[in-house]
Image (cartoon, rainbow, N blue to C red):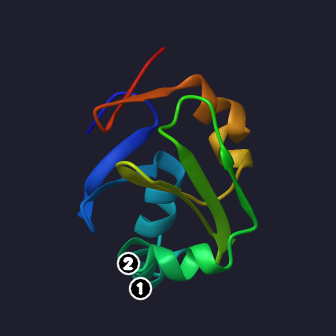
Amino acid sequence: MIKGPYYLIGRAREKDVFLTKHALEMVRKRKIPTSKLLDAIRYPWKILKDAQHSSPIPGFHRRVYVSKKNELIVIVDEDSMIIIVTSWKKTKDLEEFISKRVERGIWVEE
């Protein structure tokens, strides 16, 4: 486990995959089928096709793609990671993401 509300759960397609605590709980409680989660991790480009938002976000490398599909919001950082959350409300919205920064693929407190 890592510091903060994000948990490194593994690597996929040479990217680190993080889940928010809420997303982890939703998966554990089976409110989100594991298959949907695995699809999001294995085939992020499919989700990116339906991306509703694509913009640079401070604290992330280059461009971050945000896509909402199948009750999952997937943020894919081009450089090194895939972050999966289940709702903006549960992540204290975008501010919480922006208030953190990424250093060598690990979330660290500002």
Local crowd size for mark 2, using a 10 Å CA cut-off: few (<14), some (14–19), many (≥20): few
Name the disc covering residue 3, or none.
none
- The relative height of residue 108 versus residue 91 in the rendered view (above or below) is above
Task: Please identify the residue farthest to the top as the structure is shown.
Answer: 110
Relative to 37, is 42 on the left or the right? Answer: left
Q: Quadrant of the N terminus?
A: top left
Query: Mark 2 sits on what residue?
Result: 38
Query: Which secondary structure lies at badge 2?
Result: helix
User: Which of the 4 image quadrants contains residue 15?
Assistant: bottom left
Query: Which secondary structure lies at badge 1?
Result: helix
Local crowd size for mark 1, using a 10 Å CA cut-off: few (<14), some (14–19), many (≥20): few
**Residue 39 location, x and y as percent?**
43, 82
Residue positioned 53% across, 83% down in the render: 46
User: Which of the 4 image quadrants contains residue 96?
Assistant: top right
User: Which of the 4 image quadrants contains residue 47?
Assistant: bottom right
Task: Please identify the residue farthest to the front as the structure is shown.
Answer: 62
Q: Nearer the viewer, residue 57 or 27?
A: 57
- Amino acid type, label 1: Ser
Relative to 86, is 8 on the left or the right? Answer: left
Is the Cβ of the residue at disc 1 closer than 8 Å to that at disc 2?
yes
Query: Mark 1 sits on what residue?
Result: 35
**Residue 7 location, x and y as percent?**
35, 45
**Residue 28 location, x and y as percent?**
41, 66
Residue positioned 61% across, 30% down in the render: 58
- Amino acid type, label 2: Leu
User: Whole-Å distance between the Cαs marked 1 and 2?
Assistant: 5 Å
Q: Nearer the viewer, residue 107 or 4?
A: 107
